[in-house]
Image (cartoon, rainbow, N blue to C red):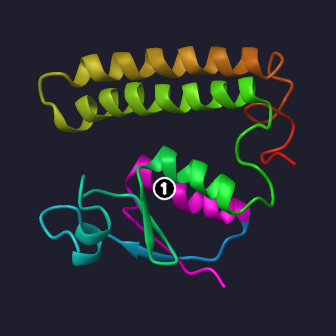
Amino acid sequence: MDKVKVLSKWVSMFGMRVPIALEEKGVKYEYQEEDLAPNKSDLLLQMNSVYKKIPVLIHNGQPICESLIILQYIDEAWDYKQLLPINPYDRALARFWADFIDKKFFDSGFRIVWSKDKVEEGKRDMLENLQFLEGALKEMSAGGSLPFFGGKDFLFS
């Protein structure tokens, strides 16, 4: 039986990807909420000694770090249904948009929440990015007729 543990923080957009993917795959796991500053757990520091940050997936004692890498691992380790499209081009598009979200939304969200002098700029960028993403997703899903990114089903057979 697989032993799976997730080190994360509920407020992290990066961290929440991991439990969502595990739930969709039907993988049972233990969740450990992390206090990110200044009291990082010894387990987090041991399992992610390079970056010392969440999320971390621990599968049978072996750590996997960085949210998009963890998602790829989950997709390959538990092959019940695929999180990413089977077609290589569609899979590359999904990875591109995940990267876009990581870079654009995190940056503008950070400015909105933490930067006193760049809040309005952050809001403007966030709205632009949301509108841009919405248009791209409508275009990719055949004009909005497909309910999920890349297809008619959330997971791919």
| Residue 114, percent from left and from top | 18, 37
As shown in the figure, which amino acid type bears the numbered disc 1? Met
Q: Would you say residue 5 sits in the magenta stretch? A: yes
Tell me the residue at 43%/48% (across/down). Answer: 14
Tell me the residue at 31%/28% (across/down). Answer: 107
As drawn, 77 above or below 149: below
Q: Nearer the viewer, residue 14 or 91?
A: 91
Q: Quadrant of residue 137?
A: top right
Instruction: Name the side, left or right, on which 39 lies relative to 107.
Output: left
Q: Would you say residue 106 sits in the magenta stretch? A: no
Q: Characterize the local packing of mark 1: few (<14), some (14-19) or many (20 or more) Cα atoms within 10 angstroms.
A: some
Q: Nearer the viewer, residue 62 or 157?
A: 62
Q: Which residue is mark 1?
A: 16
| Residue 115, percent from left and from top | 16, 31
Instruction: Name the side, left or right, on which 84 lies relative to 100.
Output: right
Tell me the residue at 74%/19% (across/down). Answer: 140
- What is the tally of numbered marks visible in this picture? 1
Q: Residue furthest bottom?
A: 1
As drawn, 131 above or below 78: above
| Residue 113, percent from left and from top | 24, 38
Q: Nearer the viewer, residue 103 or 46?
A: 46
As drawn, 28 above or below 116: below
| Residue 72, percent from left and from top | 59, 48
What kind of element bears circle 1? helix
Magenta residues span 1-25
